[in-house]
Amino acid sequence: MKSTNKMKIIAKTSYGLEEVLAAELKQLGITKTETVTRAVLFEGTKETLYKANLWLRSANRLIVPINTFKIKSADDLYHKVKNIAWEDIFSIDQSFAIDSTVFSEIFNHTKFAAFKTKDAIADRFRERFDKRPDVDTNQPHIRINLHVGKENDCTISLDSSGDPLFKRGFRDSRSLAPIKEDLAAGMILLSEWDKKSNFIDMFCGSGTILIEAAMIACNIPPNINRAVFGFMNWKTYDEMLFNEVVDEALEQEADFKFKIIGLDNDGRVLGMARANIEAAGLTNKIELHKKDFKDFEAPQLKGIIVCNPPYGERIGENVDELYTAFGDNLKKQYDGWNAWMISSNIGALKKVGLRPSRKIKLFNGSLECKFMKYEMYRGTKKIHKLVDKQQG
């Protein structure tokens, strides 16, 4: 019998993707949400939590608050954390770690608040079992989130995801991507691609955007390849329920009749993309071409371009010329297409030579970026709209 007990859940995301994440939750049947900076708050059952971890593309982790209280001192934090029945949440032979965010003047630094929380949990176990659980900051069984606000209000949460959700479970850890999966998926969802047209990434690199596009196009859960989620280590974990959620998700895969195309002129990088695409099980969904975008002939069927070109962070990159060539190529070959590109290089973006119809502020890691939309019309936009109106 499925549990109907509701819990509060916080889905964390990147700046600028909050509304995208709220829309994803709506698709999962969660209509009551509260959007805050870099997060969306909602309520759900255990089944909701499992589905959200499996399906959310633009979230980076899901945490579940288990206790809230005010504190007057560091010792007060210790005693209130110690009063929580941790032995009902995890067992003595499991490891744990504390992630903390602290704005209170009670603590000189975040680590001291985390240290007091760690001691409180360990001491509770020792008093009951004469043994302390291990602390493992790298791969703990249980991740505990401590948030202390300016008014000394504390929230203790369990991290249900474990590793961040952008770690989809198929990529070789040595294969570093210039863009994380949650941001790549968020960009595609922001583009409002209808999945009824071709999709091109002209600077595909290690294939992150292509893989996320293929998963969206075929309605494949982004985290279907992950072996472990944080909630699997909780005492309340229901393996049968999770397997039902996975089986239901696998039945929802859809056919995609158009092309997803990746271009890159670096053979070594393209080899990494090919390996990642194969690991994700998407080889038959994605075309790769070792070509400069200027030398690629646009498909006859129109579509969308979403890409993450170089920003000029590396020495010797002439991005002004690259962005100029990109804009010229759009004008020459891609009439009727929509093109989106993200970059932190605002000066280089001006060299594209096209007026963007949308500008969205996003962050790629710590870099503040603009995500720009270019609508490619033959002639002017005004004339195009007039023709549409007359034809309608």
Image (cartoon, helix red, strand yellow):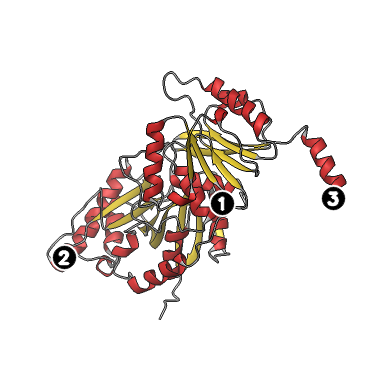
For marks 3 and 2, the one nearer the N-term is 2
The CA distance from mark 2 to mark 1 is 46 Å
Q: Which residue is the site of mark 2?
A: 127
The residue to which callout 1 is attached is: 20
> Which sits in the foreground, 256 or 221?
256
| Left or right side of 120 for 18 | right
| Residue 167 visible from this viewpoint | no
Residue visible at 53% across and 51% down in the picture: 36
Residue 378, position in %: x, y? 75, 34
Residue type at mark 3? Answer: Gly
Residue extending furthest toward the bottom = 1
- Residue at image coords 13%, 62%: 131
Q: Nearer the viewer, residue 147 or 20?
A: 20
SS for dot 2: helix
Instruction: Say which label, 3 or 1, has the lower sequence index.
Output: 1
The percent position of residue 40, horizontal first and vertical second, equals 51, 55
Q: Quick one: quadrant of the N terminus?
A: bottom left
When the figure is inspected, residue 80 is found, relative to residue 345, above or below; the finding is below
Label 3 neighbourhood size at 10 Å, few (<14), some (14-19), many (20+)? few
Residue 54 figure quarter: bottom left
Nearer to the camera, 188 or 86: 188
Residue 392 numbered tag: 3
Q: Where does residue 375 sit, x and y in percent of width and height?
A: 68, 38
Q: Residues within 10 Å of mark 1 (few under 14, many from 20)?
A: many
Query: Quick check: 11 above or below 298?
Result: below
